């Protein structure tokens, strides 16, 4: 469910629905018929987060040996996986060369 005022996601809070945008702060009554169609999940922990930005630490992540670095030709790279497209599409693998630290992404 989304906020009618700003379009941000709404979360269940104190028997109602609250906007996740602190600047907006809109609240609305909870529609139990609509809410029954959704399932809440546990909050994501930092251990579940996949680091893919430029400063991410790939060292110690799984190693791929089925790739070739475009930077130096080395055949081993650390990688992380992230679902960047729709759920029915394969995930994207983000690589960092173990030799020269060149970064790239691979699509299956």
Image (cartoon, grey):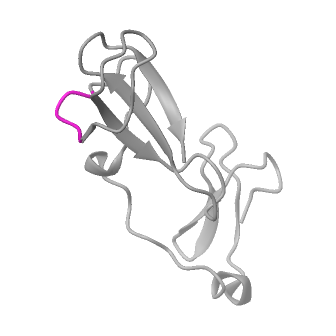
Q: Position of residue 89 (x, y in %)?
A: 63, 58
Is residue 92 on the magenta stretch? no
Report the number of discs. Answer: 0
Q: Position of residue 83 (x, y in %)?
A: 53, 51
Relative horizontal placement of residue 72, taking residue 92 as reference (left or right): left
| Image: 48 above or below 65 | below
Q: Nearer the viewer, residue 2 or 71?
A: 71
Q: Residue at x 65, y 48 (%)?
A: 25
Q: In the picture, residue 103 is in which quadrant?
A: top left
Q: Position of residue 76 (x, y in %)?
A: 27, 28
Q: Residue at x 50, y 31 (%)?
A: 105
Most extreme residue toward the right is 4
Relative horizontal placement of residue 99, taking residue 88 as reference (left or right): left
Q: Residue at x 56, y 77 (%)?
A: 15
User: Quarter of the image containing the N terminus?
Assistant: bottom right
Relative horizontal placement of residue 59, taking residue 41 as reference (left or right): left
Q: Position of residue 6 (x, y in %)?
A: 79, 45
| Image: 30 above or below 63 | below
Q: In the picture, residue 9 is in which quadrant?
A: bottom right
SS assignment for the magenta stretch, majority: loop
Which region of the structure is painted magenta? Answer: 58-62
Q: Residue at x 44, y 71 (%)?
A: 41
Most extreme residue toward the left is 60
């Amino acid at each position: 469910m989304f906020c009618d005022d700003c379009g941000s996601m709404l979360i269940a809070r104190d028997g109602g629905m609250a906007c996740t945008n602190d600047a907006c702060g809109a609240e609305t009554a909870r529609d139990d018929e609509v809410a029954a169609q959704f399932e809440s999940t546990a909050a994501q922990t930092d251990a579940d987060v996949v680091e893919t930005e430029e400063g991410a630490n790939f060292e110690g992540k799984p190693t791929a040996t089925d790739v070739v670095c475009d930077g130096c030709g080395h055949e081993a790279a650390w990688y992380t996986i992230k679902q960047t497209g729709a759920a029915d599409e394969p995930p994207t693998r983000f690589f960092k060369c173990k030799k020269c630290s060149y970064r790239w992404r691979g699509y299956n």
